[in-house]
Amino acid sequence: MKKNYRIEVDCANCANKMEEAAKKTKGVKDAAVNFMTLKMKVVFEDGKTPEEVMPEVLKACKKVEKDCEIFF
């Protein structure tokens, strides 16, 4: 399953760091962040739901960029 999310991030470098943090989160198969459109695409591992994975993705991203936001 894959879903798109609206994000709030300050710079392209931070967006890249958020992408890497999301990719390392358990339950995420792949992730991509587009700074220009302020969108994050997340592909979930089989059997994982966005409801259980996305709070962990947000935590991982906030470690990189404290004031980032993912709207889900």
Image (cartoon, rainbow, N blue to C red):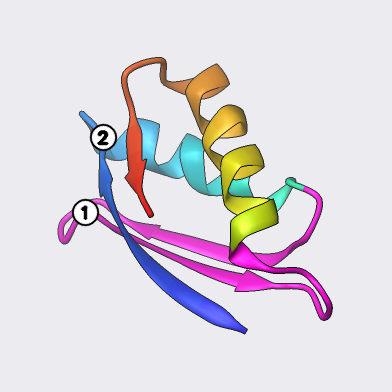
* Residue 21 visible in rendering: no
How far across and down, in percent of the image, does residue 20 sit? 60, 45
How far across and down, in percent of the image, does residue 65 sit? 42, 21
Quadrant for the N terminus in the image: bottom right
- Which tag, 2 or 1, sits closer to the chain's start? 2
Which circle marks residue 38 in the picture? 1
Front-most of residues 16 and 56:
56
Q: Which residues are magenta?
A: 26-50
Residue under the point 60% across and 47% down: 22
Q: Amino acid at mark 2?
A: Val
Please indicate whether residue 69 sits to the left or right of residue 27 in the image.
left
Please indicate whether residue 69 sits to the left or right of residue 21 in the image.
left
* CB under 8 Å between discs 2 and 1: yes
Residue under the point 68% across and 68% down: 49
Residue where numbered disc 2 is placed: 9
Above or below, 36 against 64 in this view is below
